[in-house]
């Protein structure tokens, strides 16, 4: 794969065999594309998170479970899927917006309202009382670096 803004027609050969050039490939659970943008990785994570939400929907809308329990379920099972592999990617504002939109939809489903006029984003964040997604991703990244440094020291 050649990551470049311009089309590069250079052929890469090893032992006189031309290496196939691809537009994207999966590596360690993340999708890497030749444009250098995280679009496909984010889309992949969003699709997996939505699939998980669909499977967990009966639990998430259950009236017998408390809001705190539902928040912990989302925090422990859906957010990790949504943010997997994003610690190492530079996210643009539009990427954050896409990720936050998915989470806001999940929170509205849990609270039993789909009407955005009835419960706007600010009210939603106050009601659910969770740290924002950017902080979660940065904490994951910092935890990784701390573990890595400890391993290097010992």
Image (cartoon, grey):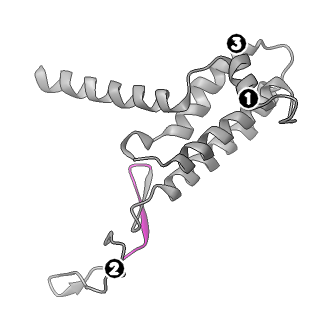
Left or right of 137 in this view: 81: right
Return the mark for residue 20. 2
Which quadrant of the view contains residue 144?
top left
Q: Nearer the viewer, mark 1 or mark 3?
A: 1
- Of 79 and 118, nearer the camera is 118
Asked which secondary structure carries label 2, the reply is: loop
Which quadrant of the view contains residue 113?
top right
Counting the numbered discs, the total is 3
- Residue 102: horizontal and vertical position, in percent? 67, 41
- 43 is higher (above) or lower (below) than 66: below
Q: Where's the C terminus, which quadrant?
A: top left
Q: Which residue is mark 3?
A: 68
Other residues around mark 2 within 10 Å, as few (<14) / some (14–19) / many (≥20) = few
Q: Which residue is mark 1?
A: 107
Left or right of 154 in this view: 46: right
How many angstroms separate mark 3 from mark 2 (CA)? 50 Å
- Dot 3 or dot 2, earlier in sequence: 2
- Residue 79: horizontal and vertical position, in percent? 57, 32
- 90 is higher (above) or lower (below) than 21: above
Left or right of 64 in this view: 84: left
Q: Which residues are magenta?
A: 21-29
How many angstroms separate mark 1 from mark 2 (CA)? 44 Å
């Amino acid at each position: 794969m050649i990551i470049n803004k311009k089309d590069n027609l250079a052929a890469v050969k090893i032992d006189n065999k031309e290496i196939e050039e691809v537009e994207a490939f999966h590596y360690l659970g993340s999708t890497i594309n030749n444009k250098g943008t995280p679009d496909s990785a984010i889309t992949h994570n969003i699709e997996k998170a939505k699939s998980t939400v669909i499977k967990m929907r009966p639990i998430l809308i259950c009236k017998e479970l408390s809001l705190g329990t539902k928040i912990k379920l989302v925090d422990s099972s859906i957010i990790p899927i949504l943010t997997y592999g994003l610690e190492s990617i530079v996210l643009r504002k539009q990427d954050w917006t896409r990720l936050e939109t998915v989470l806001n939809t999940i929170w509205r489903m849990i609270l039993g309202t789909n009407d955005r006029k009835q419960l706007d984003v600010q009210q939603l964040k106050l009601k659910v009382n969770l740290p924002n997604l950017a902080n979660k991703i940065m904490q994951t990244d910092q935890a990784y670096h701390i573990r890595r440094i400890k391993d290097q020291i010992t």
